[in-house]
Structures are given as structure tokens and as C-alpha cells.
Amino acid sequence: MCDTCGCNVTPGNAHLAHAPQPEGVTAVSVLRGLLSENDLQARHNRTHFDAHGVLAVNLMSSPGAGKTRLLEATIDALRDELRIAVIEGDLETENDAERVRAKGVAALQITTGTACHLDAHMVHDALHRLPLDGVDLVFIENVGNLVCPASFDLGQHRNVVLLSATEGDDKPAKYPVMFRGADLALLTKSDLLPVLDDFEPARAEAALRALASRAPLLTISARTGDGLEGWLAWLRGELRAERERLATHPPASPSHPHARPRARMLP
């Protein structure tokens, strides 16, 4: 799909796309090469997360589904239990990173310009500026978009997709790639369900199951806290599972260190 809209080329991989190509190399082969390079970079990122015992969670949704509000509520709930860091992705502004920093958590904003998704190269650059020592969870808040983010491995361990009550309950049917690849689906802004007569949670779950997805679907409201405990329990369980995996299969050392703090990082 990104081959069609042209967003394969991002600020993170433009140096690869614009490099001189041998005679006979076509645009299609260059794009395939970019995706291959992305996957290699993603594996490197994942090794880096593993080396620090960090669970990396990729949050995806359409714009306005409540990803940042969910992060704020999660940080409040887990601040005495787990250490969290956040990588934010938006086309412009640092608004979301500033909201997260206000909660006392390190947050790095990636502004993608015209690119409608994050890629592994952008996340790798962020990791050079995001110290992970002592961190338990890294959330990657992807650019609001239900299409292109599903096509790019960032090096995350889990994919979580948000579907808000203000969207249609047929979103899983309309955007199957995103929802089919999710490890967890969250029905957010559930506090609005009583006043919405055109969103039926059962229809949303039926659309998800029609994709042969076995991902849990949790209904939550980050504003009221309803259902939040289920989300927190899922995070604790996935972090425990990753650490058990790493205890059995220790990660290889990353090929180069990433920790290179800059003054902009908080706290």
C-alpha cells in the first residue's frame, strides 16, 4: 500500500532511497530494498530492547482515538511499579511529547514531516537519544493512521491498536491489515457509549473475529479509569512473558551502543 502512496521514503531512510543506484535498478526494486533495510533495522532495534530487558509496545490508531490520553493514564497508574519511556510520532509539533514529559517520563518526539508512519530507521535514531537503563516499558506512539503503520516493523515486541467509540464499529473490517496484526485491541472512550447510538461494541468485536484474530478486545475509558485494570494486567503479563523468554534465550549484544543522552530528554 505504501508503494502506491509513495510514503515508503521517509526522513529516516531518505539517505538510502536517494543513494546512487546501479544501472538497471528500477523504482520497484529500490522500494523493495527500502522495506528490506527497514526489517534489518527493526531486528537491530529489537535486539537493543532485549539487551535492556525492555518490552516495546507499538500503539496504533486513527487520529484522535486517545493514544496519548491512554499513555497519561498508564503512567499515572504504574509510576510506582514500572519505569516507562515514550517515543512519540507525529507529522509536526511536540505537543504529545510535552504532555508525556509533564507526567515525569522521558519522551522523545519524532516529527515525520510528510510521512504518515514511523519506520525502523526513525526509531533507531530516537534510541540513540533515549537511555534505556532501568526502563521496563517503551511505548512507541505511532502516527495516527490505520493504514501505513501496519506495514513497518519498528522492532517492537507487541502491537496494540485502539478503536475509539467515536469511530465506526466496522473499522476492523475496513482496515483488516492493522487489526489482523494486533496483539491487543482496545475499545477506547467507552464513557461515550451511552450517548452514541451508532456504535455497537458487539459489532466491532464481530468484525475483529471475522479477521480470524484471537487478540483480546478490552473496553476502556482512560478518562474515567473504567476497564484500565485489564489493560494494566495485560502489560504486566506481556512484560513477564518477555523476561521469561529472555531468561531462556539471552539476547545477542547489539552491534553498537545507543545511549547518548541529550539535554532535551526528561526527566
Image: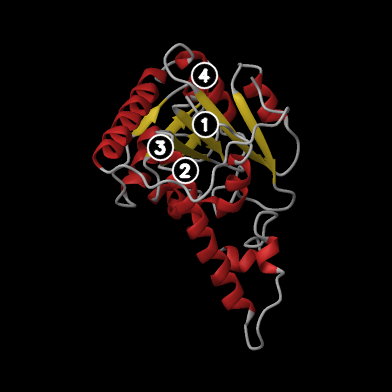
- What secondary structure is marked by label 1? loop
Q: Check contact, mark 2 vs mark 1: CB within 8 A.
A: yes
**Foreground residue, 70 or 218?**
70
Q: Quadrant of the C terminus?
A: top right
In the picture provided, is 223 more to the left or to the right than 125?
left
Q: Check contact, mark 2 vs mark 4: CB within 8 A.
A: no
Q: Earlier in the sequence, mark 4 or mark 1?
A: 4
- What secondary structure is marked by label 2? helix
Which residue bears the numbered disc 3? 185
Q: Check contact, mark 3 vs mark 2: CB within 8 A.
A: no
Q: Earlier in the sequence, mark 3 or mark 1?
A: 1
Type of amino acid at the residue the image marks with label 3: Ala
Q: Report how far apart the C-alphas of labels 3 and 1 lie in the structure.
A: 27 Å
Q: Report how far apart the C-alphas of labels 3 and 2 lie in the structure.
A: 26 Å
Residue 97: percent from the left, percent from the top? 66, 29
- What secondary structure is marked by label 4? helix
Mark seen at residue 117: none
Which residue bears the numbered disc 2? 48
Mark in the foreground, 3 or 2: 2
